Image: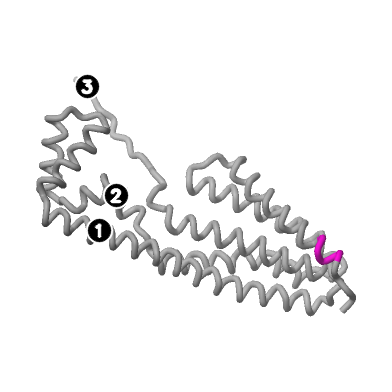
Amino acid sequence: MSTHTHHREYHNSHRLGWLRASVLGANDGIVSVSSLVLGVAAGQASAKNVVLAGIAGLVAGALSMAAGEYVSVSSQSDTERADLDMERNEIQAHPEAEHVELKNIYIERGLDQKLADEVASQLMAHDALGAHARDELGLSDNTAARPLQAALASAASFVAGAAVPLIVVLIVTRSVVLPAVSISVLLSLIVLGALSALASGAPIIKSAARVTLWGAIAMAITTGAGLLFGVTV
């Protein structure tokens, strides 16, 4: 008597919406606020002005990220809704043609003509719009645009990321702001890259290296600009 061991598969596609917004927000929060702080500090600004720049960057960045994500994802949601409305009308007006269209999709994916016709018929009878949305348009509940979720995730993660350089600025002396912020931010970017890789199933080293490299470049450029154009405040 043969036994079949049931195994459960864990996929990450359902996380794409909030994961993308969260990683983008945290990365932008760390890099933009740390770069701002380093640029101002390198320009010989006072400790008070460095903190003020960091707070302003955190507040402005979080609001900007939330608004940008909401507008962007809302546009995507509007496009998806328009495509679904068009498909719904086509199914009602030309059901035979839509059946053939769905059948041809399954033939292209490897089913023989008879089986493709049967599958298309059953799916059309069960949920015609859902079948066309998934197999023709590539839309599903897992990948559907969610503007509010993306906006909140982006803003919250931006604040969390921006808090790293800001906390460092608040607890260290003015004389060690540049190295302290640089080191703490690089370590934070490594952790962020590793966490995002774990959440998405991507290679950890490659993800961490990519995030850290671009963050380091941004900080180096803004620090150089502060040193070049800075004046004593």
The location of residue 113, given as percent across then percent down, is 15, 30
Taking the magenta stretch, the answer to whether it contains residue 229 is no
Q: Given the current orientation, which residue lies at the most extreme top position?
A: 1
Give the CA separation, mark 1 to mark 3.
46 Å
**Badge 2: few (under 14), some or many (20 or more) residues near its Cα, within 10 Å?**
some
Task: Give the secondary structure at mark 2.
Answer: loop
Which numbered circle lies on residue 84?
1
Q: Do the residues labelled 2 and 1 touch (CB within 8 Å)?
A: yes
Q: What residue type is labelled 3?
A: Ser
Residue at (82% x, 66% y) in the render: 226
Of all residues, the one furthest to the right in this rendering is 232
Give SS at disc 1. Answer: helix
Which residue is drawn at the image coordinates 55% and 58% (left, top)? 24
Q: Earlier in the sequence, mark 3 or mark 2?
A: 3
Mark 1 / mark 3, whichever is N-terminal: 3
Q: Where is residue 19 in the image (x, y as percent from the top left)?
A: 47, 55
Q: Quadrant of residue 169?
A: bottom right
Estimate the spatial distance between the alpha carbons at disc 2 and disc 1, rounded to whole Å. 9 Å
Identify the residue position indicated by label 2 in the image. Answer: 137
Q: Residue type at mark 1: give it.
A: Leu
Q: How crowded is mark 1: few (under 14 residues within 10 Å), some or many (20 or more)?
A: some
**Vertical position of residue 105 compared to residue 14: above or below:** above
Residue at mark 3: 2
From the viewer's perspective, is 166 left or right of 231? Answer: left
